[in-house]
C-alpha cells in the first residue's frame, strides 16, 4: 500500500515524512517534477507484540506501508501536472497542514490558517478531477454518437454517472463522499480520481500545543472527518527528533511529555485503517507475523497472501481470536476450550484473527 504525502510549501510535510520513515530527505521547497522520496514503515500493532511475547519466536514481522513524499508540493499557483499525475499512483493521500507558528518560516499564503489550507488542498484535488471528467465526457460524447444502439446504452450510462460526479465536485463534495452503487464503482474501477482516494489530514502543530493535541483532533475531526476522511494531529519537529532516538528512549521521552501514543504511530494506524485494511496473524516458534488483507476477504484468498500454494490447495483454516489465544495461553489450550474453530473457504477474515491454514500441496 502506498500513501502520497501532500501539503502546501513549508507545511512540514517532508519533516513528517522523515519522522515517520526515520529518513533524512531534504526539507524545504526544492522543485517540481522530480521523483518522490520513498520510505516503508512498520505498522505498530500491540496485538502482534503480545503474541510475540507469548510464543517467543525467532522473529516478529509487522505489516508495512509505504509513504511517498512529493517534492515541491502545492503552491500559490496550485499543483504541477507532474505532481497530480504522480499522486494517481497512491492508494490514499496524507495532507500535512501547517498549524504551527514560526516567525522564521514564512507561509506561502501569508498567514497560518489550517481551515483555509485544508480547503485549498481539497479544491486543488477537485479541480484536477473535474478537469479529467470534462475531458472524458467530451471523448465519450463523440464516441457514443458513433456507437450501435446496444453499445450506446452503456456509454450513455457512463456519461450520466460522470456528469453526476462532476456536479457533486462543483458543489464541493469529493468523490469519496458521493453515493456510488456497486455497479457504478465497478464502472469507475479503471479511473484514478484524486478525491476518491481516502484522505488523512495531519495537522502539524507546534510544541506549545502538545497538551492540546487531542482537543485539536476533535475540533478538526468534527469539521472535516467524513466518509474516507480522518484527522490526526502531531508535532512534526518533535516527532523527527524522537525518530533519531532508540525506540526505548523515544518511548520514555514521550511519556515524560505526557503523550500516551506517538503521533506518528497514530498517523500510521489511521493510514492503514482508512484504506480499509485489516491484519490477521500467524504464530509459531519461528515467526509471529501480521498479514494485510482488505476488509471482506475470504479465508482462501487470505491464505494466498501467505503462499499461493495455500490458496490453491486450501482445505480449511483453524481460527482463534488473538485476545482469546492470549487468555488461553497456547493453541492447544484454545483448541481444548473450543476457541480454536474450523472455518471453510468462504469464511470472512476478521481483524485480529490468528489463523493456521491446512492445505494440500
Image (spheres, rainbow, N blue to C red):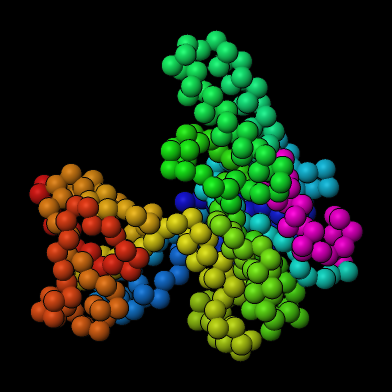
Q: Which residues are magenta?
A: 104-127
Relative to 343, is 244 on the left or the right? right
State which quadrant residue 343 falls in: bottom left
Residue drawn where x is 57% and y is 28% of the image: 159
Q: Residue 295 or 98: which is nearer the viewer?
A: 295
Relative to 39, is 330 on the left or the right? left
Residue 232 sits inside the magenta stretch: no
Q: Please determine whether, in this image, residue 207 is positioned above or below residue 352.
A: below
Q: Position of residue 353 (x, y in %)?
A: 28, 67
Residue 121 sits inside the magenta stretch: yes
Q: Please determine whether, in this image, residue 59 is positioned above or below residue 329.
A: above
State which quadrant residue 222 falls in: bottom right
Relative to 194, is 58 on the left or the right? left
Q: Position of residue 33 (x, y in %)?
A: 70, 38
Residue drawn where x is 80% and y is 48% of the image: 75
Residue drawn where x is 69% and y is 81% of the image: 212
Q: Please determine whether, in this image, residue 228 is positioned above or below residue 43.
A: above
Residue drawn where x is 56% and y is 61% of the image: 21
Q: Position of residue 111 (x, y in %)?
A: 87, 63
Q: Residue 91 or 184: which is nearer the viewer?
A: 184
State which quadrant residue 96 falls in: bottom right
Amino acid at each position: 500500500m502506498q500513501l502520497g504525502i501532500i501539503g502546501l510549501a513549508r507545511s512540514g510535510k517532508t519533516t513528517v515524512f522523515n519522522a515517520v520513515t526515520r529518513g533524512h530527505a531534504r526539507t524545504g521547497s526544492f522543485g517540481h517534477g522530480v521523483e518522490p522520496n520513498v520510505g516503508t514503515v512498520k505498522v505498530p500493532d500491540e496485538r502482534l507484540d503480545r503474541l510475540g511475547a507469548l510464543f517467543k519466536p525467532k522473529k516478529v514481522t509487522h505489516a508495512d506501508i509505504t509513504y511517498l513524499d512529493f517534492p515541491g508540493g502545492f503552491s500559490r499557483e496550485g499543483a504541477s501536472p507532474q505532481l497530480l499525475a504522480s499522486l494517481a499512483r497512491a492508494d490514499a493521500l496524507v495532507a500535512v497542514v501547517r498549524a504551527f507558528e514560526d516567525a522564521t518560516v514564512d507561509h506561502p499564503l501569508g498567514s497560518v490558517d489550517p481551515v483555509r489550507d485544508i480547503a485549498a488542498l481539497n479544491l486543488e484535488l477537485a479541480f484536477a478531477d473535474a478537469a479529467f471528467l470534462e475531458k472524458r465526457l467530451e471523448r465519450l460524447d463523440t464516441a457514443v454518437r458513433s456507437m450501435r444502439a446496444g453499445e450506446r446504452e452503456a456509454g450513455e450510462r457512463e456519461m450520466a454517472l460522470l456528469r453526476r460526479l462532476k456536479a457533486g465536485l462543483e458543489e464541493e463534495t469529493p468523490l469519496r463522499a458521493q453515493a456510488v452503487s456497486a455497479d457504478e464503482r465497478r464502472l469507475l474501477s479503471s479511473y484514478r480520481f484524486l478525491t476518491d482516494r481516502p484522505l488523512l489530514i495531519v495537522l502539524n502543530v507546534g510544541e506549545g500545543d502538545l497538551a492540546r493535541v487531542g482537543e485539536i483532533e476533535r475540533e478538526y475531526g468534527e469539521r472535516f472527518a467524513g466518509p474516507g476522511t480522518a484527522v490526526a494531529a502531531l508535532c512534526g519537529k518533535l516527532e523527527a527528533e524522537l525518530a533519531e532516538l532508540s525506540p526505548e528512549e523515544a518511548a520514555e521521552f514521550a511519556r515524560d511529555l505526557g503523550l500516551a501514543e506517538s503521533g506518528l504511530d497514530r498517523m500510521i494506524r489511521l493510514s492503514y485503517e482508512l484504506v480499509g485494511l485489516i491484519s490477521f496473524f500467524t504464530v509459531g516458534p519461528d515467526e509471529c507475523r501480521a498479514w494485510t488483507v482488505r476488509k471482506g476477504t475470504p479465508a482462501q484468498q487470505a491464505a494466498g497472501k501467505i503462499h499461493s500454494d495455500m490458496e490453491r490447495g486450501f482445505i480449511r483454516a483453524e481460527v482463534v481470536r488473538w485476545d482469546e489465544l492470549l487468555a488461553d495461553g497456547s493453541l492447544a489450550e484454545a483448541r481444548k476450550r473450543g476457541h480454536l474453530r474450523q472455518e471453510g473457504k468462504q469464511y470472512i477474515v476478521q481483524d485480529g484473527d490468528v489463523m493456521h491454514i491446512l492445505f494440500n500441496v
